[in-house]
Amino acid sequence: MISANSQDKEDYFYINNEGNEIKLDPLEIEDYIYKIISVYENNGYPFSEAKLDNIKRNKADLVINKGERYTIDSLVIYGDTKLTEKQLFQLIRIRKGDIYNQKKLNDIDKKLSEIQYLKQSKKHEFVFHKNTTDIYFYLEKVPNNFIDGLIGLTSEEEKIKLNGYVNLKLVNLLDKGETFQFNWKTEQERFQKLENTTTIPSLFNSQLGSEFYLDIYRKYNEFTNTEKEISVFHLSRKNLRYKISYQMKNSISENTE
């Protein structure tokens, strides 16, 4: 039994990490060192190093060289987009002065791919200065406007009747990331439906955005239903959306009986 315990002890590797002895399976050593480096990389130290020293049989000391501590300073934008540095900071959920965080920086590509009016012509690059980091972006505008419609006029009993539909979508027309969507459909004197959604992701370059929604449905000679909603929202750095809305609904009868 004593021999078995002694053998079990020899099966492990013991790492001295600043006075704390860590017991590991030899196969876990590489992952352990990688996790240590990741902690530093996500807390301002992109050039941190870790290695084992004073190795004796199944024991060693962990030596860590953190390197210099870095913060994010500037975003430099190349390309035909009129996006400002402040707007780009908001889009990638990073702030000027944030400590260097490799995990967050690795998510930049994913965040940019979700923006329908932008594309990267070249992968972003990091330029390191003394204790600060600049990120260089190569961004191009992506045309994402859409219009589809068919409108017809018919004359019946000396009355002009309208029939058809219009679907319109305008994205980033003012270079503010705004979206304007308009849908309209009518079928002679049976019904008419109008729907509009306008979204402005940043009000006055702030962290607040707004959205306006309008829905009107009219059934001729019977009723008209109207729904309006005005919202102010905040998209957190963890991609959580908080919204305050004011909604109004009403219905007007057109039945004269």
Image (spheres, rainbow, N blue to C red):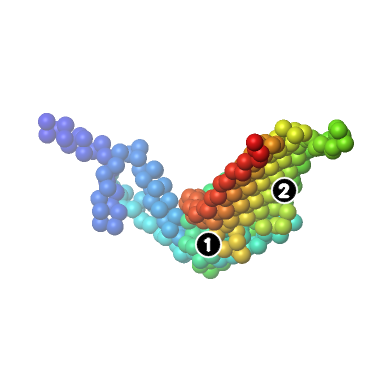
Q: Residues within 10 Å of mark 1 (few under 14, many from 20)?
A: some
Q: CA distance from mark 2 to mark 1?
A: 29 Å
What residue does disc 1 label? 95
First of labels 2, 1 by sequence position: 1
**In this image, 35 relative to 56: left or right?**
right
Seen at 26% across and 39% down, the residue is 12
Taking depth in this image into account, of 127 and 124 the one nearest to the observer is: 124
In screen coordinates, is 207 left or right of 178? Answer: left
Dot 2 falls on a residue whose secondary structure is strand
**Figure quadrant of the C terminus:** top right
Q: Residues within 10 Å of mark 2 (few under 14, many from 20)?
A: some
Q: Position of residue 136 (x, y in %)?
A: 64, 58
* In the image: residue 148, left or right of residue 155: left
Quarter of the rendering occupied by the N terminus: top left
- Residue 128 tag number: none
> Residue at horizontal 25%, vertical 50%?
21
- Image coordinates for residue 35, horizontal then vertical, percent: 39, 48
Q: Answer yes or no: do the residues labelled 2 and 1 have beta carbons within 8 Å?
A: no
Query: In this orientation, does residue 10 appear?
Result: yes
Q: Residue at x 70, y 36 (%)?
A: 220
| Residue type, numbered disc 2 | Leu
**Residue that sits furthest to the left in the current view:** 1
Amino acid type shown at disc 1: Arg
| Residue toward you, 50 or 231 | 231
Q: Tell which of 213 and 2 is nearer to you.
A: 213
Compared with residue 133, is residue 31 higher up or lower down, i.e. above or below?
Answer: above
Q: Which residue is mark 2?
A: 170
Residue 123 drawn at (x, y percent): 64, 50
Q: Residue at x 53, y 53 (%)?
A: 246
Q: Secondary structure at mark 1?
A: loop
